[in-house]
């Protein structure tokens, strides 16, 4: 069996593992947080997220959980697939050439320094200011959490690209349909810094890494009772916020205030349609044509 065949086999087996795991555990989790990052175990005071392993309700101390898993057909199949993957991987490890070149997309130490990012942006935008954009991103992050709790994503329209706005709005609608509220309270941004900057086509992409602490739990919208999570626990997580704007756009004085309510094109009080248009001048202002727009928000694993 050659290396290409082994690689294809591993990819197929990995897909089978993912599918099996998804089917077995799907009913055990519910997603929350802006962008649906956090997940809770019902009735538990702790959660499971990308930075941790199984929470206490799923540990071996539960006694019968492992027996139930291996006694089910899905569990047995999954166990066999894992054994095959381990065997094939060990064989490939002895045959594959070793690469000494790290993948910069996976290596956090390969990112640009803040000074380098500032220098690259100021080469064509002399008014760009690191402190202003950091303060703006912190304020925007807090405003995102507050709008999520209020279940009103319309006030965020001016700050997000069309794709991200629709994604978040649909996720939030899920809570509304279920008559639940994902409460974000006592929001505190511990720190934020410039993380990466690059040009893609005619767009500038600026990524900021932000660390925050907040209460994060789900309540019934009618009874206000906590149904998932724990309101007495403050969760600390890091996030990557990626902003984009069209190449050639320059910083305008006063445009880094998160409470700006005027159209960046015509200056009229902002009334943004669902398509991201200013109702006064018709400009689409959520594509980075006039200022930075949030295009991606994800939880950091490091």
Image (cartoon, rainbow, N blue to C red):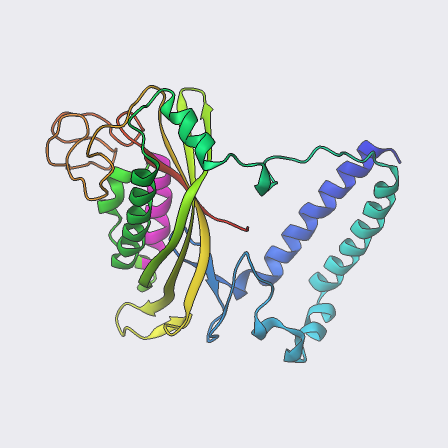
Q: Determine the residue positioned at 11% across, 29% down.
A: 280
In front: 117, or 235?
Answer: 117
Q: Quarter of the image holding residue 146? A: bottom left
What is the total number of numbered labels drawn onto the structure image? 0
Q: Which residue is drawn at 40% across and 20% down?
A: 202
The residue under the point 47% across, 62% down is 39
Residue 174 placement (x, y as % from top left): 36, 55
Magenta-drawn segment:
161-175
Examine the residues drawn in magenta and state their main secondary structure: helix
Q: Position of residue 24 (x, y in %)?
A: 62, 61
The question of residue 242 being in magenta is answered with no
Question: In terms of image quadrants, where is residue 136?
Answer: top left
Quadrant where the N terminus lies?
Answer: top right
Position of residue 210 measured from the top left corner of the image (x, y, whole percent): 41, 49
Q: Position of residue 291 (x, y in %)?
A: 28, 30
Q: Which of 26 and 255 is in front in this view?
A: 255
Give above or below for 169 relative to 290: below
Reply above or below: 193 against 46.
above
* Residue displayed at 46% across by 52% down: 238
265 horizontally vs 30: left or right? left
**Which one is in front, 78 or 232?**
232
> Image quadrant of residue 103?
top right
């Amino acid at each position: 069996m050659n290396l290409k065949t082994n690689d294809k086999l591993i990819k197929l087996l990995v897909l089978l593992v993912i599918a099996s795991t998804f089917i077995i555990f799907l009913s055990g989790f519910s997603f929350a947080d802006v962008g649906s990052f956090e997940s809770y175990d019902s009735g538990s005071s702790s959660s499971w997220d990308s930075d941790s392993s199984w929470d206490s309700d799923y540990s071996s101390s539960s006694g019968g959980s492992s027996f139930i898993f291996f006694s089910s057909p899905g569990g047995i199949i999954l166990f066999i697939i894992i054994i095959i993957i381990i065997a094939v991987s060990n064989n490939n490890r002895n045959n594959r050439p070793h690469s000494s070149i790290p993948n910069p997309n996976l290596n956090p130490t390969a990112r640009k320094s803040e000074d380098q990012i500032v220098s690259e942006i100021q080469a064509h935008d002399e008014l760009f200011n690191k402190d202003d954009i950091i303060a703006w991103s912190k304020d925007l992050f807090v405003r995102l959490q507050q709008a999520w709790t209020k279940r009103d994503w319309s006030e965020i329209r001016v700050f997000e690209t069309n794709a991200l706005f629709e994604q978040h709005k649909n996720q939030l609608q899920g809570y509304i349909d279920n008559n639940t509220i994902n409460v974000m309270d006592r929001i505190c941004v511990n720190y934020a810094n410039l993380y990466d900057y690059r040009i893609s086509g005619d767009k500038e992409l600026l990524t900021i890494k932000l660390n925050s602490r907040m209460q994060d739990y789900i309540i019934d919208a009618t009874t206000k009772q906590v149904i998932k999570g724990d309101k007495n626990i403050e969760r600390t997580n890091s996030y990557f916020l990626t902003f984009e704007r069209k190449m050639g756009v320059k910083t305008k004085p006063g445009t880094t205030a998160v409470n700006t309510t005027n159209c960046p094109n015509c200056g009229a009080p902002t009334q943004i349609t669902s398509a991201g248009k200013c109702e006064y001048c018709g400009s689409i202002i959520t594509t980075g044509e006039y200022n930075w727009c949030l295009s991606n928000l994800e939880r950091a694993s490091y």
